[in-house]
Amino acid sequence: MGVFGLLTLALVGLIVIGFPVGFAAGVISAFGLAEVHGSLADPRVASALARTMLDRIDGFLLLSVPFFLLAGRLMNGAGITVRLFDFVSAVTRPLRGGLAHANVLASVLFAGMSGSATADAMGLGTIELKAMAHAGYRRDFAVGITGASSLLSPIIPPSIALVAYAVVAEQSVGAMFLAAIVPGILLALGYMLYVAWRLRFETDVPPAGRFDPCEVWRSFRGAVLPILMPAIIVGGINLGIFTPTEAAAVAVFYAGAIGVIVFRELSLAQLIADLRGAMIDSAAIMLIIAFTSAFGQVLIRAQLPDQLAALATTLTSDPTLFLLLMILLWLVVGCFMAQTPAILILTPILLPVAEQYAIDPIHFGMVMALTLTLGLLTPPVGMVLYALVKVSGVPFERLVVISFPYVVITALVSVMLVLVPDLVLALPRLAR
């Protein structure tokens, strides 16, 4: 296996036992550089580690990360979630189990402002669970669809995970955002089709309501400004009006204006709290990016990606089969590691291997990002599961069982993206 293979296993081991991802990558990177230079005491080790870290985070594109995080927090604190759910509930009222479908559609809209599955589960999810309980839905059914719909937030743009992949893989953020639109829609449709089928066996489903155009219009007026935010971001980037970083800054200004001027629900104290929270989250993400970038450079120096490529080509020469094998790998990794850190660690290792198969980097990154979201609903990490325990009171073990059908649906969508690459690549190609 070699020293660098052992270091990779050591990194995985540290993460599994709960060591912070960024610090684990930093420690292993230092030992990897020591192997290259002969000694941990060699000043070139510290110099190479610092230089690699600073080179990766000293980029204009990464400024978009704190801006997107702040924009999402501002939208959360501006009373947006209630308005979004009121609108989609009015639209789906004529359907049997309308609130279950509204649960998914609200997450689709919320994803375009937040990008965080846990924020969806704990913010919008609280509202959804309360409304569904009041309407008479079984708690297990309501919690299941609430947890599943929160997986849309890390996929539908703007997504911090997709920005992270674009930075590490040196791809266009705008292209990654466009590539995520169809997979996000497919995922939402998959959940809604399952809900429609499942409702056939539910006896406590409230009857369909009457469609009220006046109610739809009233609720739409309250939700239209937040709904426009994703269109402004993605459209502005791909039309060349502004860069991803400028788009993120525009999103902050837009969210702040809605919260302070239009809805008047963002107080000074809330603004300060949102700034502080975004600053802490940004610092954590930047630290992870810096250290994992150093780890990636160590592996590249050790030619580990080339060795993996040679090994992979001995197993199969079919790019489709290779991607299906990668899905199995990512399913395992997602059980122990959050989506964004996993992307940052795995991309420098696996992307060169994928390029040996002539797999488009946008296609590869989208399948990886979608598959890794499953870790949010699978133990032992399962961040969304822990969030749902807090807001619903359902035991963790029960949540794992409830979520399983949605895990299967998400995995099937990942396989579909592998078998039909145009589902990912069609929109980016049209924008070129």
Image: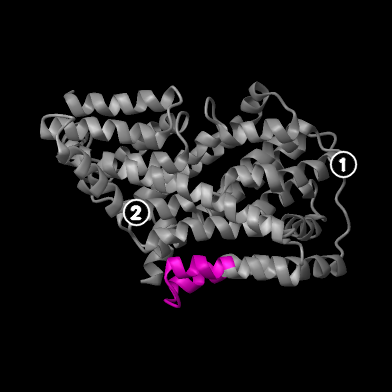
In the picture provided, is 260 more to the left or to the right than 119? right
Q: In which quarter of the image is residue 243?
A: bottom left
Q: Of helix, strand and loop, which one carries label 2?
A: helix
Question: Which color scheme does this rendered protein use?
Answer: one colour
In front: 195, or 331? Answer: 331
Residue at x 15%, y 40% (from the top left corner): 44
| Residue 105 appears in the rendering | yes
Quarter holding residue 312:
top left
For label 1, the crowd category at 10 Å Cα-Cα, with few meaning under 14, some 14 to 19 and many 20 or more, is: few
Query: Exactly how many numbered labels are in the figure?
Result: 2
Q: Residue 57 got which mark?
A: 2
Q: Does the magenta stretch include residue 250?
A: yes
**Residue 185's x, y, as percent?**
56, 55
The type of residue carrying mark 2 is Ile
Is 234 within the magenta?
A: yes
Q: Tell me, for residue 134, which label it has, or none.
A: 1
Query: Where's residue 65, x and y in %?
Result: 46, 56
Residue 269 point in image, percent of width and height: 70, 56
Residue extent of the magenta highlight: 232-252
Instruction: Tell me the tag on residue 272.
Output: none
Looking at the image, which residue is at 23% across and 46% down? 352
How many angstroms separate mark 2 from mark 1 (CA)?
A: 47 Å
Residue at 61 percent of width and 70 percent of height = 254
Residue type indicated by callout 1 = His
Q: Which one is nearer the viewer's eye here, 302 or 94? A: 302
